[in-house]
Image (cartoon, rainbow, N blue to C red):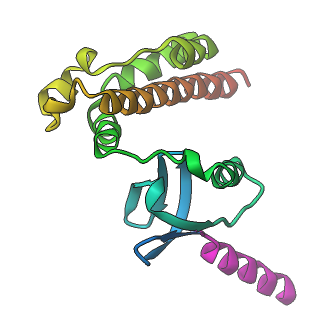
Amino acid sequence: MKNFLLLFFFLISTSAFANDILGLKSGKFYSGKVKAIDYCLIEFKVETGTFLIPMKDVEYIQFKNRKNKKYKKYVEILENESSIVQTSENCIKGTLDAEKFHGKKGKHILFGILFGGFATLGSALFGSPSVEKDPDTLLYSENRELFNDFDYLRCYKKKAKSSNTMNTLIGWGIWLGAFLLFSQ
């Protein structure tokens, strides 16, 4: 029993310190979790929050788990290093505006509850969020001068669409959870 407890605490302590390591070209490094990765940006979560880091600023990433999709994507990016997109500031601003101001979260959760997988597929395949359709972004964004910029709009739409799809999945999950709970 004593050996079991020692093994348990050892596994807990080693897993608590097992994080992804992100090294920047500036010489700084951070311990946290890679949440998403593409040719433009890395979404990296540390204790103080989640940050979007341009891929062009990354020196290396040391993954805790080399069997996940994010690691495979990172290897693909390294193999095609010439295709790393030199992320513009406008793209980052579009992504951040979509994250902060893009509304309709409750509406998409409701669609997920009512229509399940159909709403998720519809959001993922046919959703077309835009700045013009979102009053919060129009009112509160400090980047109004970029509303005609291609990079800003492309990145805004990509982030808003993924957010909408995730919210319909959450709604569908709520419906499934309620169904399982009340069907017993």
Is 105 on the left-hand or right-hand side of 69? left
Q: Quadrant of residue 122?
A: top right
In the rendered structure, which segment of residues is drawn in magenta? 1-20
- Kindly tell me whether residue 83 is visible in this rendering: yes
Is 36 on the left-hand or right-hand side of 146? right
In the image, 167 versus 90, the foreground residue is 90
49 up-or-down from 155: above or below: below
Give the main secondary structure of the magenta stretch.
Answer: helix
Residue 56 picture location, percent across and down: 46, 56
Which residue shows up at 78% across the image and 83% down it? 5
Residue 166 belongs to magenta span: no
Which residue shows up at 45% across the image and 65% down it? 46
Residue 171 picture location, percent across and down: 52, 24
Quarter of the picture containing the C terminus is top right
Residue 5 belongs to magenta span: yes
In the image, 53 versus 20, the foreground residue is 53
